[in-house]
Image (tube, rainbow, N blue to C red):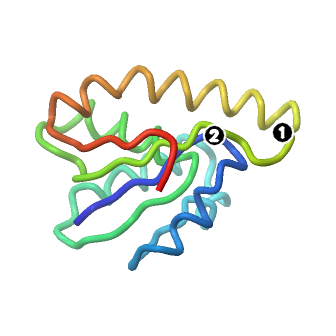
Amino acid sequence: MKTVIMGIPKSGKTDASGNFENVIHTDNFMFLNWTEQSEFLQNLFSLESDFTLEGVAAVRALRKWMSRNKGKPCEQVYWLDYSFEELSKGQETMAKAVTTIFNEIEPELKRRGVAIDKGGL
């Protein structure tokens, strides 16, 4: 099963991913710029293997994959939108950006049959 754990910074995505196997952390690809990172990560949804993708960049990867492909990119999405720590200005900006993208793709995810759980694992 393909699972995606995404949300705003400091919302517990990495901690939550500890409950899953075959986790791919988007932070491991921070050496790439945002465009390169989402380009690389979106390719994962075309793989036959099961995995859990975790991180703020996952939402951009999903959007990119769905703009290019038909079908279901994954079976389950967990959206975490509550920060457990105070965010820096940069993190606040990122939180707004990923929330905007999630709100944009959520209806299409649902239409494609992806289960969405908002707020917790």
Residue ID at (51%, 67%): 17
Q: Is 12 drawn above or below residue 110 in the view shown?
A: below
Residue 108 locus on image (x, y percent): 24, 26
| N-term-proximal mark, 1 vs 2 | 2
Neighbor class of circle 2 (other Cα within 10 Å; few <14, some 14-19, many 20+) is: many
Cα–Cα span, label 1 and label 2: 10 Å
**Residue 1 relative to residue 84: left or right:** left
Q: Name the residue under label 1.
A: 87
Q: Is 118 drawn above or below residue 104 in the view shown?
A: below
Residue flagged by tag 1: what amino acid is it?
A: Leu
Q: Mark 2 points at which residue?
A: 8
**Residue 17 relative to residue 30: left or right:** left
Residue ID at (88%, 37%): 88
Q: Is mark 1 on a helix, strand or loop?
A: loop
Residue ID at (67%, 32%): 95
Residue 45 locus on image (x, y percent): 27, 55
Residue ID at (82%, 34%): 90
* Mark 1 and mark 2 residues within 8 Å of each other at the beta carbon: yes
Q: Could you say which disc has been placed on residue 95 in the image?
A: none
Neighbor class of circle 1 (other Cα within 10 Å; few <14, some 14-19, many 20+) is: some
Q: What element carries label 2?
A: loop
**Residue 81 relative to residue 62: left or right:** right
**Residue 68 relative to residue 37: left or right:** left
Residue flagged by tag 2: what amino acid is it?
A: Ile
Q: Which residue lies furthest to the bottom in this view?
A: 21
